[in-house]
């Protein structure tokens, strides 16, 4: 079990040491064999052992040394079979040479691909290094005056350097709730006391659970524990025994005491986990609480059904505007936005997308607010439009719940860049505001199945 990042470092170092030792052993083997052969030759020279031709001599006697079974086509047939004709021999030789040339071309192509990958990696490292200097020396020291400039917004879109990502997120989300690290410690203490009490009276709570409120049930230790175990399971860092298990448990527990009216809602663990990976514990809690206090997140985590439907209807306005064919296909299959948007919004895409891609989505979310969440959704639909058009209801729902793991950030952001968040000269905020003022008539006009349901 891991007890911290130090243990992880020791494990990696130990594995590297074992690999280096193993490599050294394998490298030294041919030399040992050669020394043994020399000793055997010396011993044989002193006795009457017959002298065998050396390996080099044996190779010289061969006109061609086959390196694989493909070389067999150049060999003569056994004596009991008809000999090859000159034409057949020439044909086999040409086929063999063509196979060798093809193999060489594949090797060259693979080497070029690896070279391009390495060049691209170095390029990205240089970009990140330069961006980190700009963020640390020019932007962050003058945050209030620089954050809205065109240059900063362009840098933001390209992705935040990991070393400054947490700080930028924290500054962009803000602290309107005025939570302090001391306040976090108070709620954490209450959570720990609540868990101790829960453990001591678990049997009583089980018998009375039917009368408990939804918030009480969802803030229970069992549900938080269960959700933590399912948070980024492939990383093995948030599960019991992992280095971030206790931190995630603390942040979620403290929040249920801070907002008992909301309690714990499934999906919160993914948001808290991403913040913990980028911020210190107290800062992660402060950012987490302020993030969930945003209008869109509050509507979803409080399960405000009417308000959620307004968000779905606004999304469909831009869906139809940007992807009319796919929009029609979804309508034909009765696939409403709630079937995929709820999971995306609840976890801010951190469950459905690869973690590195999700962090890029978070970067833009911190820059543009809730609009970017729905723009990301449209970008995903645009990216996989051709695939989705071939699917039925069940397969679309399954595909959108768990997106391909090899999804690359640049492909998604290219699709997002081609997504226009303007409908009839109205931006997202104006469309959503119109739906809030007169949802029924606006919905009828845009034929939103989400609001009609």
Image (spheres, helix red, strand yellow):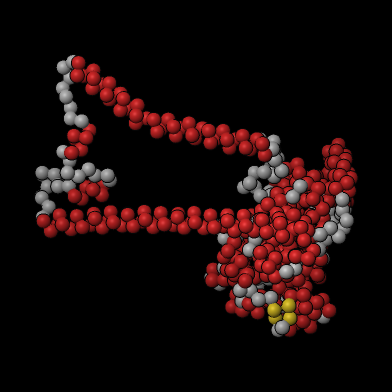
Image quarter hosting the C terminus: bottom right
Q: Is residue 189 above or below residue 217?
A: above
Residue at horizontal 57 percent and vertical 60 percent from the top: 408
Pick out the residue farthest to the front: 137
Q: Is residue 348 above or below residue 313?
A: above
- Asked which quadrant contains residue 391, the reply is bottom right
User: x%, y% of residue 354?
Assistant: 61, 56
Q: Can I make out residue 337 in this image?
A: no
Q: Nearer the viewer, residue 38 or 361?
A: 38
User: x%, y% of residue 317?
Assistant: 70, 78
- Asked which quadrant contains residue 288, the reply is bottom right
Residue at horizontal 17 percent and vertical 44 percent from the top: 63
Q: Is 355 left, or right, of 427 in this rendering?
A: left
- Asked which quadrant contains residue 300, the reply is bottom right
Q: Is residue 197 above or below residue 137?
A: above
Q: Nearer the viewer, residue 29 or 89?
A: 29
Q: Is 62 left, or right, of 339 in this rendering?
A: left
Q: Is 297 left, or right, of 54 in this rendering?
A: right
Pick out the residue farthest to the top: 47
Residue at horizontal 81 percent and vertical 48 percent from the top: 282
Residue at horizontal 85 percent and vertical 41 percent from the top: 192
Q: Is 352 left, or right, of 19 in this rendering?
A: right
Q: Can I make out residue 95 in this image?
A: yes
Q: Nearer the viewer, residue 396 or 318?
A: 318
């Amino acid at each position: 079990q891991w007890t911290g990042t130090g243990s992880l470092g020791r494990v990696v170092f130990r594995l590297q040491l074992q690999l280096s030792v193993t490599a050294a052993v394998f490298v030294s083997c041919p030399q040992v064999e050669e020394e043994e052969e020399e000793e055997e030759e010396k011993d044989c020279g002193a006795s009457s052992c017959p002298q065998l031709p050396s390996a080099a001599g044996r190779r010289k006697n061969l006109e061609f040394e086959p390196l694989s079974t493909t070389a067999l086509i150049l060999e003569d047939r056994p004596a009991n079979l008809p000999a090859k004709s000159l034409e057949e021999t020439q044909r086999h030789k040409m086929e063999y040479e063509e196979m060798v040339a093809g193999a060489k071309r594949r090797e060259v192509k693979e080497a070029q691909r690896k070279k391009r990958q390495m060049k691209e990696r170095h390029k990205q490292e240089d970009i990140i290094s330069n961006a980190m200097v700009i963020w640390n020396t020019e932007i962050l020291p003058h945050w209030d005056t620089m954050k809205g400039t065109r240059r900063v917004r362009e840098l933001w879109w390209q992705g935040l350097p990991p070393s400054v990502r947490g700080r930028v997120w924290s500054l962009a989300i803000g602290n309107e709730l005025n939570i302090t690290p001391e306040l976090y410690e108070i709620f954490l203490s209450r959570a720990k006391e609540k868990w101790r009490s829960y453990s001591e009276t678990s049997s009583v709570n089980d018998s009375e659970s039917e009368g408990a409120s939804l918030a009480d049930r969802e803030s229970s230790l069992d549900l938080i524990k269960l959700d933590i175990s399912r948070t980024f399971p492939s990383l093995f860092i948030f599960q019991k025994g992992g280095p971030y298990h206790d931190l995630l448990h603390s942040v979620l527990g403290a929040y249920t005491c801070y907002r008992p009216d909301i309690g714990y809602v499934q999906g919160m663990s993914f948001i808290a986990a991403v913040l913990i990976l980028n911020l210190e514990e107290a800062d992660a809690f402060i950012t987490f609480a302020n993030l969930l206090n945003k209008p869109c997140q509050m509507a979803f985590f409080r399960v405000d059904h009417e308000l959620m439907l307004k968000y779905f209807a606004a999304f469909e306005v831009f869906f139809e505007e940007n992807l009319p064919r796919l929009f029609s296909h979804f309508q034909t299959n009765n696939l409403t936005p709630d079937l995929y948007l709820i999971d995306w919004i609840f976890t801010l895409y951190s469950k459905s997308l690869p973690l590195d891609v999700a962090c890029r989505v978070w970067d833009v979310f911190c820059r543009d607010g809730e609009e970017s969440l729905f723009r990301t959704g449209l970008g995903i639909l645009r990216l996989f439009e051709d695939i989705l058009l071939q699917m039925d209801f069940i397969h679309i729902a399954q595909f959108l719940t768990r997106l391909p793991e090899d999804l690359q950030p640049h492909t998604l952001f290219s699709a997002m860049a081609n997504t226009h968040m303007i409908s009839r000269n109205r931006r997202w905020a104006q469309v959503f505001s119109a739906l809030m003022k007169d949802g029924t008539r606006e919905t009828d006009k845009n034929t939103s199945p989400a609001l009609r349901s």
